[in-house]
Every structure is written in structure tokens, then in C-alpha cells.
Amino acid sequence: MRIMHRNAVKRSNEGARIIATATMGVAVGFFIGISLSSLHLTKISLLSNVENSFEVGSSGNVNPEALGSVSLFKIYVPSNPRGAELLPPGIIVSESDLYLRRLWGDPSEDLEKKPKYLVTFTVGYDQRHNINAAVNKFSDDFAILLFHYDGRTSEWDQYEWSKNAIHVSVMKQTKWWYAKRFLHPDIVSAFEYIFIWDEDLGVEHFNPDEFINIIKKHGLEISQPGLEPNNGLTWEMTKRRGDSEVHMVTEEKPGWCSDPHLPPCAAFVEIMAPVFSREAWRCVWHMIQNDLVHGWGLDFSLRRCVEPAHEKIGVVDSQWIVHQVIPSLGLQGEADNGQEPWDAVRTRCRNEWAEFQARMNDADKSYIEGLNNYRKG
């Protein structure tokens, strides 16, 4: 009898637990159902708001009030460009270009042809005839950009090509000052090659299209046309040779080259008329110092941006130019410490060269020390 009583009590307790569990399950299911329904309705409402906000009327206008009232979901994409982490990747345009566009019509129809190369000259109006002769050498595959150091821009409209050129005017600045500020690699990435040239170059014997073909043929990432041997020559490396199409090495004065593969015997062009591939320019731009505006010493460090430098940097002999040695930039200077304007400019050039080399040496030293510390750690 006792055994039967205990079994009955046990069955009664189990039944109560089953009923309680079932009741709790129904309650939990009810609340989950309500939550999911609410979430689903919220999503529908959000999507509806987004869709409605981008409705365009028959006139092609977007309702600005609707755009401002949209509740957006949270976005954070760490791999986006710095500062753009809150944007959906599909809307990001991280590079630009220098193509001129219309103010009307379909944007896809703005450009009849996209220039493949960019040519920049840093100019004063006094050299307009020389620049006109140079620009007329370049086909419509080349975009033209003039940096004006004398503030005179409208007068250039006497030339038809000037109306389609890009003009940037800032008083008394050098081409490397302009290049650092207006030729960011993400701005000129549409161009395969970038010419950064002085204004006093004679181009009678220069064919730009043929020059491009030659540097592509020889795989030159940094190059320049050969210089007429009898005019304004400083380095043997950049002297035109009459018996070759290109050259990449030379012999200099005794003691000038510690290594035949290093500047100025190889891996070297001058800063008066360099031509950079898109990839090489991305590196070189980062090496230009904001405050060292003359660029002296830069030519000896260009080799850091291509490998192997003695094979990727060269001079094109069959397409050559004449350096006319017009001291126009010096005339933009001012007397300093008893020096004439031109002498004051030259003094700063030499000082900048020494400063650039010191900074490069310090950067190398810092990098090596950091690398050694990392290996020790």
C-alpha cells in the first residue's frame, strides 16, 4: 500500500511539471513571435522609407525633404579609405582625374576622347613662344597643364590649345611646389605617363608619340629625352648619344661614381625634363618634401622608386631636346643678405640639396634601427 501511494504521488508531480513546462513554452513562443513580427515590420518600414526617399518625379528631381528624413542602418567598413569608413564601399570614388567636363548633358557623353598622358610646364608669360612651340608637338593623347608662376593666365588664350588646357596660377612658386600640391597620385592616376618639364626646352628634334613608344619598348619607368651636348649640360648621363636609341649607364669624371649602377653613372635623370610612369610617380610624389621647393637632390634618389633602377631609368637618345638655360626662375627671387635675386635662389637650391640628403640619411638610419630592434624583440 505504501508503495502504491508513493507511485501515485510521483505521477502527480510529473504531470504538474509537464503542465508548467508547456505553459512556459507557450508564453515564450508568444513573446518571440511578437518580437519577430515587430522586427519584420520595422525592416519593411525602413526599406519603404529608403525606397520612397529616392523616388524621382517625372521632372527628374529628387525630394530633398525625403532624403533628409531617412533612418539609415549603421555602416562601418574598416577596409575603406581612411575617413570613409561610414560609407558603403559601392559609393566610394578614391581617385579623381583632370578631364574637363561639361556643365550640361549626360556625364557619360562628356569626353569624346580621354588623353592617356599628362604634360605639365611651369611657365611665365615671357616664355609663351617657346611653350607654344612645345605644346604643338603633343597630340591629343596628351593633356596639357600649365603652372603659372607669374600670375598671367588669360593672355595665353591667344593660343587655341590654351582654351582646352588646365591652368593653375600661384605667384612665384616652383614646379615641385606645384607637383606636390596638384599632382597627387590619386589625381593623375588616369594617365600612363606624367611629364614634369621646365619652360626653357627646345623640342625641334623631339616627337612625343615616338618617345612614348621607345620608353614602353625598353620598359623605362623614369626617363628623359637626351640633351643636346653643347647646351647647358651638367651630367654625362643625360648627354645625347648619336649612336643609340637609349642608354642607361655612362662614365663620369673619376671618383664621381662609387658603383657603376648608381647615380650619376646610372639610375639617373635630371629634374628639368623627367617623365614618370604612373607607378613610379606614386612613389616619387611621396618623396617630395613640402618645404624643399626646388627639388635639388631628388634626381639622385629617384632610383629608390623602381627596381632594378639601372634598368628602369634611362635617357632616350633618338628623341632629344635642347636646354636653353633661361634663368627665368631666378628673376622671380628677391635679393637676400646682399645677394642678387638669382644668387639668392641658387643659394637656397644648394642648401635644399644638403637638407634633403640629410633627411634621407636620417630616414634610412631610423628605418634600419627600427628593423634591428624588431629583430631583437
Image (cartoon, helix red, strand yellow):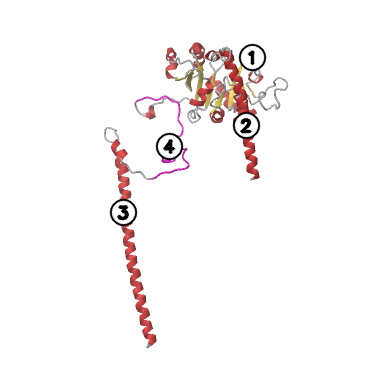
Disc on the earlier residue, 3 or 4 = 3
Viewer-closest of 370 and 216: 370
Q: Where is residue 326 in the image (x, y as percent from the top left)?
A: 56, 12
Q: How far is mark 4 from mark 2, CA to CA?
A: 37 Å
Q: Which residue occupies the extreme bottom position in the image?
A: 1
The verdict on residue 205 being magenta is no
Asked if the residue under mark 3 is in contact with the one under mark 1, i.e. CB atoms within 8 Å, the reply is no
Could you tell whether 3 is left or right of 309 in the image? Answer: left
Look at the numbered disc 1 and give the secondary structure of its residue.
Answer: loop
State the residue position of label 1: 229
Neighbours of disc 4 within 10 Å: few (<14), some (14-19), many (20+)? few
Disc on the earlier residue, 4 or 2 = 4
Q: Which amino acid does label 1 sit on?
A: Pro
Residue stretch in magenta: 74-103
The verdict on residue 85 being magenta is yes
Q: Which amino acid does label 4 sit on?
A: Ile
Q: What residue type is labelled 3?
A: Ser
Asked if the residue under mark 4 is in contact with the one under mark 3, i.e. CB atoms within 8 Å, the reply is no
State the residue position of label 4: 92
Could you tell whether 356 is left or right of 4 in the image? Answer: right
State the residue position of label 2: 362
Asked whether the viewer can see residue 293, the reply is yes
Disc on the earlier residue, 1 or 3 = 3
